[in-house]
Amino acid sequence: MKTILTGIRANSELTLGNYLGALLPMVRLANKHSSEYQVNIFVPDLHSIISEIDGNLQENTIKTIKYYLAAGLKINDNVHIYRQSYVPAHSELCWILNCIATMGETSRMIQYKEKSKGQESSNVGIFDYPILMAADILLYDATYIPLGEDQFQHIELTRNLAMRFNNRFGEIFTIPAKTADQVKFMGVTDGIRIRDLLNPEKKMSKSTKAENSKIMLSDEPERAAKKIMSATTDSLGKVKFDMFNQPGISNLLQIEALVNDIPLQDVVSAWAGETSYGKLKEKVAKSVLEMLTDFQEKSSNILDEEVLHLLKMGEVYANTVANEKLLEVQKAFGLR
Ligand code: TYM
C-alpha cells in the first residue's frame, strides 16, 4: 500500500492559505483514497520551534487536528494522526541524512533564504528544516505529499537525498513522486498558492502584519467577508484568470473554486465576460463567510479528548513503522 503524508505547523492560527493550499486538499485526498493508501497526517512540532510560537504549542496542535476533522477528515484504520516529537526516529533520521546532504544543496533552498532574510544570525534549525522534512517523509516511504507550491523545492531535495542514499546502500527508501506528479495526484493543474489580499504578488502568510492581508480560520466570518471586499484588484475591468497580470482577481477566482470544490476552469468560465469586480467580490465574500461559519461551528464541537485519543493511537502506529525503517538505515550505515 502506498502512503500519502503531510503536515502543517501549529505555530499560530492557520490562514485560509494553509487551509485551501494544504489542509483541505489533504482531507479530500484522504477521504478519496484511504481504502487503497495509508494516510499519515502529522503536526511537525519540531519544525515549529525554529521560529516564534504564538500561544501554546500543544493547544495549537490540538486545534490544528480539530481543523482536519472539521474539514471532513474521515478516520479509519488507514488514517494516522501523530505529533512529530512523539516519534523520536524523525530526529534520528534527520541527523543521518545530514551526513549525506551537502551544504550547497541545502543553502539553495528558497524557504531558508526567505526565513533567514533580515536576521543577523539565524538558527541552524532554519537551515536544517528541509532535511528534517525529508526524514518525515522517507521514514514512512511516502509517495504523495500534498503541499502548497512554496514547499515543492523541499520535495525535490527529498527525492535527491533518497536516490543518493539508495545508490549507496540499496533500495531502502521509496522515492516520492516528482512534483509534477504530486500536482496531478492532488487534482490541480498547478501548485496552489493563495495570495496576500492586499499584495497579491505575495503568498498569504501567517507572518504578514497587516490584518486585511490574510484571513485566519478563527476570523469572525463577517470580518473575513469584509477583507475579501477590500482585496486589491486591478484597473483592467475584466474578470480573467491571469496570475501574472491580474493576480488579485485570479486569487479570488481560485478561492471561489477551492472553497466550493468546483474545478477552477468551471469558475473561470462562469465569470468570463464579467466586468464588475464588485459582483465577483460579493460572491467570493459570501462563499468564504458560509464556509467559515460552518467550519468554526464544526471545530468547536470536537472534544480535546477525542483528539488526544486519535494522537495516541497514531503515535503507536508511527513509532512502529518509523523504528523499523530507522533500523534498516542504521544497519546500512554500520550503526547496528
Ligand atoms: P507550514 O506550516 O509552513 O505550511 C503548511 C502548508 O500550508 C501551505 N501554505 C500555503 N498554500 C497555499 N497558499 C498559501 N498562501 C500557503 N501558505 C502555506 C504550505 O505549502 C504547506 O503545505 N514544511 C511544512 C511542514 C512539514 C511537512 C513535512 C509537510 C514539515 N515536514 C513533511 C509535509 C511533509 C510547512 O511548510 O509547513
Image (cartoon, rainbow, N blue to C red):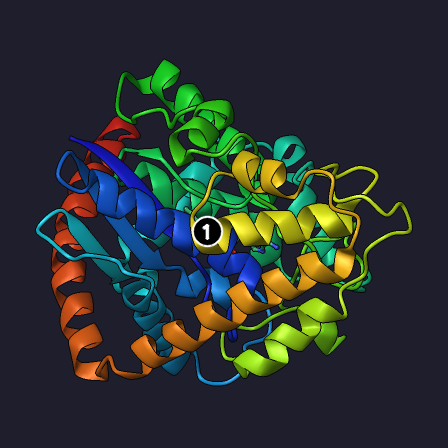
Q: In terms of secondary structure, where does tag 1 sit? A: helix
Residue 9 falls left or right of residue 108: left
Where does residue 268 sit, x and y in percent of width and height? 62, 39
Q: Residue at x 72, y 69 (%)?
A: 229
Residue 275 falls left or right of residue 292: right
Q: Nearer the viewer, residue 282 or 184?
A: 282
Q: Residue at x 34, y 19 (%)?
A: 166
Can see residue 336?
A: no
Q: Residue at x 38, y 30 (%)?
A: 185
**What's under tag 1, amino acid-wise?**
Ala
Where does residue 239 sit, x and y in percent of width and height? 75, 44
Residue 246 higher or lower than 49, as above or below: above
Residue 292 falls left or right of residue 194: left
According to the image, label 1 marks what residue? 22
Asked whether mark 1 lies closer than 8 Å to ligand 1, one says yes
Query: Which quadrant of the rendered structure holds the N terminus?
Result: top left
Q: Nearer the viewer, residue 155 or 217?
A: 217
Q: Residue at x 56, y 58 (%)?
A: 17
